[in-house]
Each structure stands twice: as C-alpha cells, then as structure tokens.
Image: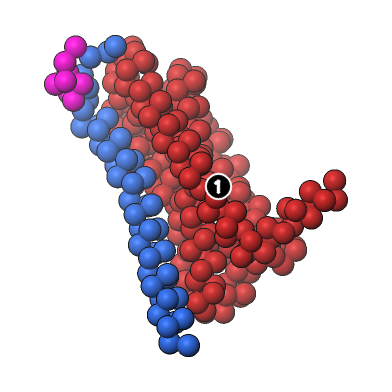
Amino acid sequence: MNWASWSEFVAMGGQGAYVWGAFVVCAAALALEPCLLALRRRNILDYLRRAAGRS
Amino acid sequence: MPMSIAACLRYAAPQAFYSLAGRLLPWFAATAMLAGAAGLYMAFFVVPTDARQGEVFRIVFVHVPAAWMSIFIYVVMAFWAAVGLSLDTRLSFMIAHALAPTGAMFTFLALWTGAILGKPTWGAWWIWDARLTSELILLSLFLGSMALNAAIDDPRRADRACAVLALAGTLNLPLIYYSVPEIAGRMPLQGVFIMGAAFWMYSVALALARVRCVILEGEAA
C-alpha cells in the first residue's frame, strides 16, 4: 500500500495534476466511445424501424 | 479440416458475422473491465513510487498500452484492408472501417499521456522527434481514413480508397519504434501487460460493436 490517506492519494506526491490529468482523460475517452457507439446504434435501428414501417 | 474452414467462411457474410459479433462482444467487454480494474490496482497500489520520476511514473500504465494499441490497431486495420483488396470481401473492409475510430482514440491518448509524462520528465510537452512525429502522423492517418470514408458516397469506392490509404500508411510504422525512451527499461512490465490486455479486449469489443453498426448501416443504404 502506497498511501496513508485519501488526500495523499489525490495529491500524488504533488504531481496530482499530471497523474490525474492523464488517467482521467483516458477514463473519459474510454467511457465516451461506447456511449457514442450506443447512440449510433440507436439511430440506425430507429431509422431501420421507420423504414420497415413505411414499406 | 475442410469442415472448419467452411464454418469460418460462413461468417464472412456480414449477416452471419453480425450475430457472431453480438455473442462474442459481452465476453470481450467483461474481460476488458476485469483486466482494467486489475491494471488500475497495480498502477496505484502495488507499484511503488519511482525513485527518479516519482508518482508521474504511474502514467506509463496507460501511456504504454495506449501507444501499443495505436500501432497494433493500425496493423490490424491495414491487414483487413489488404484482405479486402485482394479477396474483395465486404466484411474485411467493414472491419477496417470499424477499427479506425478506436485506433484514433488510442493514438490521441498515447500523445496526450506522453505529453503529460514528458513535461515533468524531460521538461517539454512535445518535441519534433521521429517517434512523436510519426505518432502524430498515425493520428492523422486514422482521422484521414474516417474522413475519406465519410466523404465518398459510393461505399465500394470508399472501401478501396481507405484500404489504399491504410496500406500506404504502414510506411509510417517502423519510424515509431526507432527510439523507445530509456524509462521503458524500468517499466513495471507485468502491470503494463495487464493494462495492455485490458485495452486490447476493449478494442476488440468496440470494433465488434462498431462492425455491427456498419453492417446495419449497409442495410439502410
């Protein structure tokens, strides 16, 4: 275990801005991509359903 | 043996692959999440503070796997582009298209985390050396492939144009590993491999999900 307290963990030895700037952006990007893809899937399924309804 | 080849070829039809991808997807996603959790645990609670770089060193746990994936996804994309060009299989082109956005994202993350790692380590966010420049070219190849695909209306022409671009872009790859920085030698390999596995499984899951979208969009066109 590297950290004695929560605040020590957040501070990252005074390099928190670097460490969290890297990890948070990675986490955000990795989470955003599936969301955008789910949106794309919903749009195309909606379109196909409407098209099937018309014919 | 001929039976199993026939079984594989069955999935070369996009409709059959659509259901296969749907069945495989949850397994890759679950593995990615488990490995990701293990990798984060290693990164923050197992690996001790680095004697020279301090806590910033922990960034290699996302930087190195992201850089690996950016190159690996490009190689896989170029492979499917080559298969598509030589065998004229629609599904191969679809897989190549599906890989580009995930590849672009990992390339961006490699550049972003590399800049953050570079500033406190070497005193600069960015330098125009061969490796960084070709990683930037890699990002423009992924984005260029997506833009080209979107710009050409005829899907068959778009497939071929993107495939030729992908193959031409492989010339860029050897440059990236010209100079691996010296910190790579002190890398906590085990943890970085676990995170690499997580990013790999994530990429497979995302590519499968995106191929399914591409197949559906093919139905709509």
Single out the residue that lies furthest toward the right. Answer: B2
Considering depth in this image, is B174 or B161 the residue closer to the camera?
B161
Considering depth in this image, is A30 or B218 the residue closer to the camera?
B218
Q: 10 Å neighbourhood of mark 1: few (<14), some, or many (≥20)?
A: some
- Residue found 16% across the figure and 20% down from its top: A6
Q: Pinpoint residue B48: horizontal percent, then vertical percent.
A: 34, 13
Confirm whether the magenta stretch covers residue A5: yes
Considering depth in this image, is B187 or B190 the residue closer to the camera?
B190
Q: Pinpoint residue A9: horizontal percent, then vertical percent.
A: 20, 21
Q: Which chain is red?
A: B
Does B129 sit above or below residue A33? above
- Residue found 41% across the figure and 27% down from its top: B39
The colour scheme used to paint the residues is by chain
Single out the residue that lies furthest toward the bottom. Answer: A55
What span is in magenta? Answer: A4-11
Regarding mark 1 in the picture, which secondary structure is present there?
Answer: helix
Q: Which residue is mark 1?
A: B24
Q: Which chain is blue?
A: A
Q: Quadrant of residue B160?
A: bottom right
- Disc count in the image? 1
Q: Amino acid at mark 1?
A: Leu
| Left or right of B147 in this view: A13 | left
- Residue found 68% across the figure and 58% down from its top: B11
Q: Quadrant of residue B14?
A: bottom right
Q: Pinpoint residue A23: horizontal percent, then vertical percent.
A: 30, 35
| Residue B26 in view, yes or no | yes
Confirm whether the magenta stretch covers residue B92: no
Q: Quadrant of residue B82?
A: bottom right
**What is the chief secondary structure element of the magenta stretch?**
helix
